[in-house]
Image (cartoon, rainbow, N blue to C red):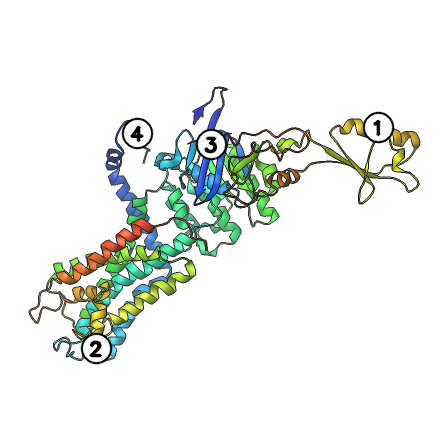
Amino acid sequence: MVDRADGGRTAVEVDGLTKRYGTVEALRGVSFTVAAGEVFALLGPNGAGKTTTVEILEGFRRRDGGTVAVLGTDPAGRPRSLRQRLGIVLQECAVESNLTVREVLTRNAGFYPDPRPVDEVIELVGLGEKADSRVARLSGGQQRRLDVGLGIIGRPELIFLDEPTTGFDPSARRGAWELVRSLTAGGTTVILTTHYMDEAEALADRVAVVAAGRIVAEGPPSSLGGRDVGEAKIRFALPRDVAAEDLPVQVRRASVGFELSTTDEVEVLHALTSWSIAHDIPLVGLTVERLTLEDVYLRLTADKGAVRSTDAGTDTGPGEAAAGPGRRPRRAAGRQS
Amino acid sequence: MSVAEPRGASGLGESARQLPGELRLVVRQLRYEQLSFWRNRFGAIFTVGFSVVFLLLLAAGGGTQRSSVLGGIEEIQYYVPGFAAYGVMSACYNNLGIQIVVRRQTGLLKRLRLSPIATWVLFGAVLANAAVVSIVQVGLLLAIGRLGFHVVLPHAWLAFVLAVLVGIASFAALGVAVSTLVPSQESAGPIISLVFFVLLFLSGLWFPLTPGSGLAQVANYFPIHHLIVAFFAPFDTLRGASPWAWRDLGVVAIWGVVATVVALRRFEWEPRRN
């Protein structure tokens, strides 16, 4: 790991990463930094470049351009000393089906210089009763948990989770989230790809939204895309005999009642509620809504789902079109070299 | 095992220093390959059981008759080395080829590629596993032939061992090579086994080929017939023939070299999507 000037430590540093498959530009200058101990989520539609990015960091795929440092090492040469410090959980559960849980974990523990005790891992992923069952006899959820066990058996400093809860039922997802939290409590850095907003919101310290091979927004989930300071939507209905023109603020007619968008909801609410009390007219069903992470995500990734080989390098920079009203999203992507 | 720091040593020197440890890793990995293989009853029966059952069936169906094609020796004397060759080919070509496709398509190869295990340790164990299964079958068939049918064992053991080793190496290379030509898990069995059994039929496993016949000329281009001949030669010393079937071993080896080139050029770690 690399010491940074500000005293923190950097686990992953990616700058200007590019990758092309034939004529398709899968990555068009991806840059980001992950601090040690952080949970960093890559969010984006299928084909956006999440998996390609992660596979380059893992050393599985070669990049075409840009620089990458994972725990201070370039992963391109797949140095074993680096692989021994990484944990990887893939989407597919890929384990020899005729071996038992304990056998697979014991075998893989032998790949690492200082593995976690096998029994400890079995307990941690909740497979105590299945320890001596063959992998083929595990349920889908149990196989995923074994997968996670294989990911952490080597005491990794950095763990990659590729869509860790896809196909899980709600309670299994909670369980998986708890496990991730317990990992980070121990100081492990986590890079996670997902297309579940609630997952990113529940787990990640920071989120980067990837679309069409670029990072279009980056920041903590609570403020991504300016959602903490952007517009709020105020909705309410009025009694039938009251006209919208009597209100102290401009409103639009909505499907039910009225609505208005504002970046200064405190002032507007004050005006509305004072008026309501003074005239004894109720504001029926009054609500204030902020953009959800999903709203921001959909806005950022609209029409960018698929990677195109054209229109490279002609735009003004990622995030521009997507920022919408309010502040432009913080970003670190797209520095074109 | 501790992680070796670079310390300015060349990569080669570093791996040489770790060699004994690495070899131990191969043996350790081989144990799990063996567990995996023998526990998969279907695969084990298909590979090992078939060679034994075929031999017994052919022996029951007149294997003790004398063959005019083979100059009057008992047919069982031909079938034992023939099915020993089949055992090697089924373990190395058929079983290994299908196994690699399945492992690639289920993501198992990718996962191992991402783990710290060295590629050569991984492949060393996989190939050693195919070799062990081959040798078990050869031993089993020789034992059945000797104890059950009084087959005369090879007089030239070295020639026989050489044939077994060349067979293992070349057909394992063919197994890896053919795995790179198969696009999906579903088509692995049909493609790999169909080619195998058609060629086995053409190559004189079930009946000795008449020299110079059309079938023999077709079989001549493929390695299976030559491996059967190379296995048979060390047994066939009663008539004063040489136990060293150099020409046949040469053909098998050439196929092995070509297969190795194909395997190295085309090998993929990740599932192929259609």
Q: Chain of mark 2?
A: B
- Identify which residue, B224 or B67, lies in the foreground: B224
Q: Chain of mark 1?
A: A
Q: Please give the label number shown on residue A16.
A: 3
Rendered-image quadrant of the N terminus of chain A: top left
Residue A148 placed where, x, y %?
48, 44
Q: Mark 3 against mark 4, which lies toward the viewer?
A: 3
Residue behind mark 1:
A271
SS assignment at label 1? helix
Point 88% across, 32% down: residue: A276
Q: Residues within 10 Å of mark 4 (few under 14, many from 20)?
A: few
Q: Is residue B269 visible?
A: yes
Q: Residues within 10 Å of mark 1 (few under 14, many from 20)?
A: some
The answer to whether marks 3 and 1 sit on the same chain is: yes
Point 26% across, 73% down: residue: B56
Q: Mark 1 against mark 4, which lies toward the viewer?
A: 1
Q: Chain of mark 3?
A: A
Q: How many marks?
A: 4
Query: Mark 3 or 1 closer to N-term?
Result: 3
Type of amino acid under label 3 = Gly
